[in-house]
Image (cartoon, rainbow, N blue to C red):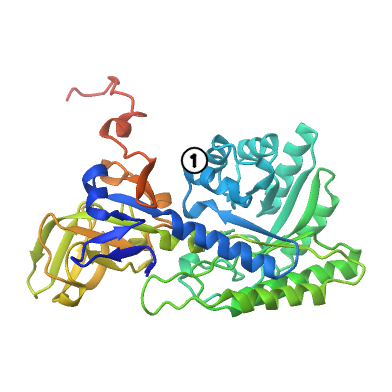
Amino acid sequence: MGPDTLHNDETNHLWVGGVRVADLAEEYGTPLYVMDESTMRRRVQEFVRLLAETELPTRLVYAGKAFLCQAMAGWLKPFGVGLDVVSGGELYTALAADYDPAAIVFHGNVKPGAEIRYALEAGVGQIVVDSLAELQSIEREAAALGVRARILLRLTPGIDAHTHAFIRTGQFDSKFGFGLADGIGDAAVKSALDLPHLDLIGFHAHIGSQILEAEPFFANLEALLEYALKWYRQVGYWPRVLDIGGGFGVRYGEDDDPPDLGPTFRRIAAAVREMTPAEARLPELAIEPGRSIVGEAGVTLYRVGALKRVPGGKRYLAVDGGMGDNIRPALYQAFYPARLDGKATNERTDEFTVAGRYCESGDILVPSIRLPEPGVGDLLVTLVTGAYNYSMASNYNRIPRPAVVLVADGEASVWVERESWADLVRHDRPYAAVPTPNDV
Ligand SMILES: Cc1ncc(COP(=O)(O)O)c(C=O)c1O
């Protein structure tokens, strides 16, 4: 529950990164995304350490889809880690921050030709291929540019991680990747090895997100190794990279108990050593965490705008944000803890439904939570909002997206400015009269 991120003082006022949330709200307005630098730094360093302990060649790749803006890419750069992007827009953002293109991994299950060209021209390090059609289009674009594209094939190894269906990707009927059950993976490997402008550097499999068990990560790696061995025996091909994706769970609620990843990584390293043929080189082991780096670093500040008790006794607390800045509760019933600033948590007197301001009955941020007695104008803080909140935000109802502020050692700096109403109409063209059959 991001306990390291949010602190309260003796008057129950909440602090993040050494700054009072009330001061942040006052200065930058609400809703407001706040990212705590020290939490992100600790997470990156933990992954770097876990990978180093495997004593394998390894690579940490941050999954930008969880949270990306120019400043995030700029912040990440000195760590020397990889960056996973899934669109031309994410790639553009990374390059705008001067991210080393060689450290960029380009993902996505549909990559338009123009985006493949852009990636190849920019010199991205790796492209993760998701379909047979895409193999052909990368071959075409690479041939036109006279380059050889370094690719990985995204495989679906048939591992059913126990997480919400919408964020589960490793099972055979996933929309992502090449299934290993129906021979489509084999067809992809054959093509990739045959096509002259493709350099098949390895295999990738990401089995889902918010996974709270260790076993599926190991099973995923084992499936990739077994598949690689099959090709080694058949044609002598052995991958240079095995990328097991991200998906490491975080603590949203008290029941979420992410596993200690140390033993899992050690087991993974042992399996890689054991299963790599004696004459082959150890492959590089890559991981792509997103949520587990930024999730617990983020909190969102809202102002309470309305309080209602409806027939039946249910109490609504409505805030000045909602599904436009956090779609995850509406999209897949994601749970977020919440706190009221300046109110003692041991005085949680009643049960509330935290509603957003968007014109949907489903715009509920927290279906049921015990809180101290709130007042209109209070600050409500939702926790663990660093991942897939800002990155999934929309302008539904023509509501500008909030600012993102980074806090570090008692200082705040704006990473993304709050959108204005003028931003909302920036791409609109004014109405120009069109011929109509009838006058209005
Ligand atoms: C290919 C791939 N890698 C990494 C991730 C990051 O997952 P997470 O944020 O759960 O670590 C995702 C998430 O969808 C993904 O699809």
Q: Residue at x 28, y 23 (%)?
A: 431
Seen from this angle, which residue lies furthest right?
A: 279
Q: Which residue is mark 1?
A: 70
Residue at 52% from the left image edge and 68% from the top image edge:
168
**Dot 1, how many residues are within 10 Å of its Cα: few (below 14), some (14-19), or many (20+)?**
some
Q: Tell me, yes or no, if residue 322 can be seen here.
A: no
Give the residue type at disc 1.
Answer: Gln
Q: In this orientation, does residue 185 appear?
A: yes
Figure quadrant of the N terminus: bottom left
When the figure is inspected, residue 218 is found, relative to residue 287, above or below; the finding is: below
Towards the viewer: 364 or 375: 375
Of 200 and 299, which appears nearest the observer?
A: 299
Residue at coordinates 52% horizontally, 39% vertically from top-left? 93
Element assignment for label 1: helix
16 vs 147, left or right, is left
Which quadrant does ligand 1 occupy?
bottom right
Closer to us: 146 or 10: 10
| Residue 358 spot, x, y in % from top left | 23, 52
Q: Position of residue 272 (x, y in %)?
A: 77, 72
Disc 1: residue Cβ within 8 A of ligand 1's nearest atom: no
